[in-house]
Amino acid sequence: MNFFRSKKLFIILIGFIVLVVLIGYSLNNRGHLNVGEKIVSDAVGWVQNVAQAPVTFVTDIASNISDFKTTYEENQVLREQLSQQKSVAYDLQNLEEENEELRSMIDMTETARDYEPIYATVIARSPEQWVNQVTINRGENDGVQENMVVRTAEGMIGKVLHTSGGTATVQLLTGFDEFNRVSATVLREDDSDIFGMIEGFDEETEMLLFRIIEESDTDIEEGDTVYSSELGGEFPAGITIGEVNEVVADQYGLTRIAMVEPAADLFDIRNVIVVNRSIDQPEDDVEEGDDES
Amino acid sequence: MTRRVIFPLILFVVMVLSGVALELLPQQLLMGTYMIVPHWLFIMLIYIAIFYDRNDTYYAVLYALIFGLLFDIVYTGILGVYMFSYALVIYIVRGLKKMLQGNFYVLLILSAFGIALADLSVYTVFTVIGLADMPIEVYLLNRLVPTILLNLLFLVLIYPLIIKPIRKWGRELT
C-alpha cells in the first residue's frame, strides 16, 4: 500500500515536471509552431470552418433583426454625412494625383503606406480568455506570415501570432504586453508627430495603453487619433488604432501613458483583413527599430 | 468497437464547438465585467469519469490528457496547461466518485467542484508565467463564479441527451 501511494505521487510529480518543460518550451517558441502543432491546427481549423457556417448563419439573423430597428435613424445620419463626403472625396482624389506626380518626380515608388490585403474570416475565438486570440481561415498557403497586422474596416485589431498551412492565430490588441508591441503615432501639423508604443490593455477601463516616447512628449490631447507607425519596421503606416481618451503618468512617473479607446470592436470580430506591407522589410542596419518578438 | 471511436469523436466536436461558443453568447456578456469560459470539454470528461469509467479503468484521465493537449495547441499555444489541469482534476474527481454513488446530485456537486478546481489551476499557472494579471478577488467574483454557473447550466441541459447512452455503454464495459 505504501509503495502504491508513493507510485501515485511519483506519477503526479513526473506530470508536473513534464508540465514545466512543456510550458518552458512553448514560451520559448511562442510564434513558431512545430510540425505536430501545425497538423493539429490545420485539422481543427478545417472542422471549425465547417462548424462555423451554421453558427454564422444564426448570429447573422439575430444581428440582422437588431439592425432593422436602427436602420431608419442610421439612414438619416448617413445621408447627411454622404453629402459632406463627396467634397472630401474630390479633394482626396486631387491630392492623391498630386502626390503621385510629385513622388514620380523624385523616383519614390513605394511607401510604407501601401499594403496588400488578404481577406479572412474568423473561425474561432479562444474560449478561455487569458490569451486573447482568434483563429482565421487563411494561413501560410495564402501568404499570411507571422507579425502581419490584422485589421477590420474600423481599425487595427491585432497581429498574426503564428501560422499553419490553412489557419493563422491572431493576437488581439487586448492581449498585448511588453513582448507584443506596436509602434504608433499621433499626427501633428508640423514635424512634431508624437511617437510611442501600444504595449498593453487595461481590463478595467477597456483601453489600450499608449506609452509615449519622452522626446516627442509634447501636447497629446483627448480626442487625438492614434495611427500605426512604419517605424516598427513591420507594419504599414496609417492604420487607425484608436482615439486618445485620457493621459496619465505611468506608475513610476517617468513617462506618460495615453489611454486609447480602440477604434475596432475587439469583441465582435467576423471579417478581417490581414495586411501585408508591400514595401520591403528594412535590412538589419540603421532602421532596425523595435522588433516584435 | 463503436465506443472506442465515439467518445474521441464527441470530445473532438465539443472542443471545436467551444471555439465558436463565444460567438453564440450575447455580446453584453462578453463586454461586461463578467467573463465566462466554456469548459464543455471538461464537462464531457466528467460524464465519462462518473458514468462510464469503472474502478479499474482510466479512460477519462486518458482522454483528459489527449484532448487537453489538443485544446492547448489550438486555443492557447502554451502546451501542457489544460492537459495537466484537466487530467489532474479528472483524476481527483474519479477518486471522489468511488466514495459516492453515481447519480445526478453527485454529478452536480462533483462538477462544480471540478470546474472550480480546474479553472483555478489554469489561473494559477497563467499567473505564474505572467500571462494573466488579475487580482484573485476580482478573478473569483467576476470570472470563477459565472463560469461555474454557466457550465453547470450546460451540464444540466445536456443531461437528458447523454445520460442513457453513456450508462448503457458503461454497462457494456463490464
Image (spheres, helix red, strand yellow):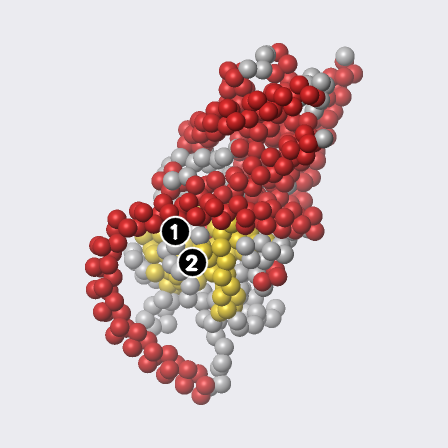
* SS type, badge 1: loop
Residue A7 x/y as whole percent: 76, 21
Q: Write the residue at 56% across / 66% down.
A: A288
Write the residue at 26% across / 54% down. A71
Where is residue A158 drawn, in percent x and y?
Answer: 48, 55
Q: Looking at the image, which is closer to me, B9 or A204?
A: B9
Residue at the image position 52 percent from the left and 33 percent from the top: B39
> Is B99 on the left-hand or right-hand side of B157?
right
Same subunit under labels 2 and 1? yes
Q: Dot 1: within a 10 Å radius of its alpha carbon, few (fewer than 14), some, or many (20 or more) residues? A: few
Instruction: Specify whether residue B29 is in view.
Output: yes
In the rendered view, tell whether residue B76 sits above or below residue B136.
below
Q: In which quarter of the image is residue A163?
A: bottom right
Where does label 2 land, which residue? A152
Q: Pointer 2 and pointer 1: residues touching (CB < 8 Å)?
A: yes
**Looking at the rendered structure, which numbered label has been put on residue A148?**
none
Q: Distance between the residues labelled 2 and 1?
A: 9 Å
**Does B26 sit left or right of A31 as displayed?**
left
At a point 63% along the width and 21% down the height, the residue shown is: B168
Dot 2: within a 10 Å radius of its alpha carbon, few (fewer than 14), some, or many (20 or more) residues?
Answer: many
Q: Numbered disc 1: what chain? A: A
Please state which amino acid type lies under the numbered disc 1.
Asp
A158, A153: nearer the viewer: A153
- The tag earlier along the polypeptide, 2 or 1, is 2
Q: Residue A88 placed where, x, y %?
A: 28, 73
**Disc 2 residue type?**
Thr
Q: Name the residue under label 1.
A: A265
Residue A83 position within the rendered picture, expressed as x and y whole percent measured from the top left: 22, 69
